Amino acid sequence: MGLVVVVVLISLGMLFLLKFVVFKPVGEERATFTRSQLATNTLNALMATTTDCRSNFDLKISDLIQGCVDDSGETCDNNLNYCNFLNLTIEELMDETLVAWKKDYLFQVYTDRPALSDVEVEHNGCPGEKDTALFFLPRTYQGQIFVR
C-alpha cells in the first residue's frame, strides 16, 4: 500500500511539472527576441534578393538601393527608375511574406545627409511594439546608407 501511495505522489508531481514547465506560455523575453529576429532576418534576406530589373544582370535589392540613392538615372528593363522599381518590388515581397503572416511593417532607406524619402514602403506602420533591424550599405557621395 505504501508503494502505491509513493507512485501516485510521483505521478501527481510529474503532472504538475508538465503543466507548469513544458506547457508554459511563451514569455515576453522570448516573444521580443522572436520579433527582433524576424525583423533582422527579413531585412538580411531582402538585401540579398535578386530582382528581374535587368534581364542581363542579377541586380540585388541592395544594388538597386545604392543606385537609387546615388540618383544614377539608370532604369530597369520596364523603364522604371531604380527607386520606383524598388518601391513596387519591396511592397510585393512584403505582401507575400509579412502581410500574409499578419505583420505590420515600415521599410525605409535613408542617408546620414539630407533625408531620402524615395524608398519607403509600409503596411499599417508599426503601431505599439516596434522591433527594428538596421542594415548598412557602403558609403556613396550621398553619405552612409541605412536600411531600416
Image (cartoon, rainbow, N blue to C red):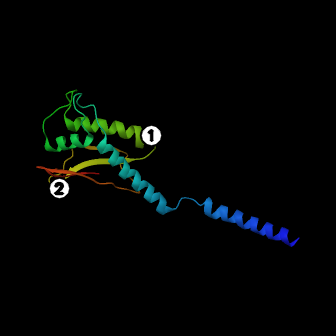
> Which SS class for mark 1?
loop
Q: CA distance from mark 1 to mark 2?
A: 33 Å
Badge 1: residue crowd in 10 Å (few <14, some 14–19, many ≥20): few
Q: Which residue is mark 1?
A: 100
Q: Quadrant of the N terminus?
A: bottom right
Question: As drawn, is 98 to the left or to the right of 133?
Answer: right
Image coords of residue 113 (percent x, y): 14, 54
Q: Residue at x 17, y 55 (%)?
A: 112
Query: Mark 2 or mark 1, which is nearer the start of the sequence?
Result: 1
The residue lying toward the viewer, choosing from 124 and 25, is: 25
Residue 39 can be seen, yes or no? yes
The residue lying toward the viewer, choosing from 139 and 10, is: 10
Question: As drawn, is 128 to the left or to the right of 110?
Answer: right
> Which SS class for mark 2?
loop
Residue 121 can be seen, yes or no? no
Image coords of residue 61 (percent x, y): 26, 40
Asked if 51 appears above or below 44 in the picture, the reply is: above
How many marks on residues?
Answer: 2
Question: As drawn, is 5 to the left or to the right of 30?
Answer: right
Asked if 102 appears above or below 129 in the picture, the reply is: above
Image coords of residue 52 (percent x, y): 27, 31
Q: Residue at x 37, y 51 (%)?
A: 39
Q: Residue at x 71, y 62 (%)?
A: 15
Q: Residue furthest left?
A: 141
Question: As drawn, is 6 to the left or to the right of 40?
Answer: right
The amino acid type found where label 2 is placed reads Asp
The amino acid type found where label 1 is placed reads Ala
Q: Which residue is mark 2?
A: 112
Q: Residue furthest front?
A: 3
